[in-house]
Structures are given as structure tokens and as C-alpha cells.
Image (cartoon, rainbow, N blue to C red):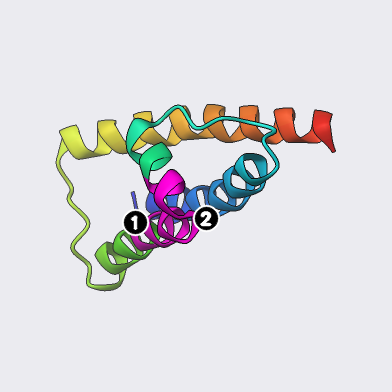
Amino acid sequence: MVYLLFYLTTLNLCDTLLTWFGLKYAFISELNPLMLTFNEISPLIFIITKVSLSILLLLFILFEKVPRSTLVKGLTVFASLAYTVVFCLHAFWLIQFV
């Protein structure tokens, strides 16, 4: 479970950079309404929010407060798979433009 949280953290940070780059140069669009709003207000708020979420995951690990329920494990696996697909799509689209 800890490895999945590290994986999500790393993926989130990488996706933050790819998404910011793609949005800045209008290569991609943000489909998450909340993150789109943050980016429209300020790209810095978008980045700070995404990085803060990664820090939160790391704090769960650091303070050994990783939930161990079956539900949380299932949600973490689902989030990892879904986020991997999103990350790969962003990367694929940006590679085509660059």
C-alpha cells in the first residue's frame, strides 16, 4: 500500500508538470472542473494544489497513518490505474505536439 501511495505521489507530480505545460501552450485542456478553475485563477494555485495533495500522501506515509481497510486499498488501486491512464494520455498528446 505504501508503494502505491509513493507511485500516486510521483505520478501526480509528473502529471502536474505535463498538465501545466500542456495548458500553458494550449496543447491540452483540463477536464477536471475544480483544477480548471484553479488554473484559470492562477497557474500557481493549480500547481500548489497538486503539489499539496502529493505532500499529503507523503505525510500519511511518514506518520504511518496509511489506512489499511479493503475499501481504501481498492480505491488506491483504482486511483493508480485511472491516473496512469490519464498520465499516459497527457504524455502521448504532448509528445505529438512537441
**Which residue matches tag 1?**
53
Kindly state the secondary structure of the residue where label 1 is placed: helix
Q: Is residue 33 above or below residue 50?
A: above
Q: Is residue 84 a member of the stretch shown in magenta?
A: no
Q: Is residue 90 above or below residue 46?
A: above
Q: Quadrant of residue 74?
A: top left
Give the crowd class for mark 2: few <14, some 14-19, many >=20 residues within 10 Å. some
Quarter of the C terminus within the rendering: top right
- Residue 40 percent across, percent down from the top left: 44, 44
1 lies left or right of 9: left
Residue occupying image coordinates x 35% and y 62%: 52
- Residue 89 percent across, percent down from the top left: 63, 27
Which amino acid type is shown beneath numbered disc 2?
Leu
Residue occupying image coordinates x 46% and y 29%: 81
Which amino acid type is shown beneath numbered disc 1?
Leu
Which numbered circle lies on residue 13?
A: 2
Q: In which quarter of the image is residue 60?
A: bottom left
Which numbered circle lies on residue 44?
A: none
- Residue 94 percent across, percent down from the top left: 74, 35
98 lies left or right of 53: right
* 10, 22: nearer the viewer: 22
Q: Give the range drawn in magenta.
A: 38-53
Residue occupying image coordinates x 70% and y 42%: 25
* 25, 62: nearer the viewer: 25
Give the crowd class for mark 1: few <14, some 14-19, many >=20 residues within 10 Å. some
Q: Is residue 40 a member of the stretch shown in magenta?
A: yes
18 lies left or right of 75: right
Q: Is the magenta stretch mostly helix, strand or loop?
A: helix
Kindly state the secondary structure of the residue where label 2 is placed: helix
Label 2, label 1: how many angstroms apart (C-alpha)? 9 Å
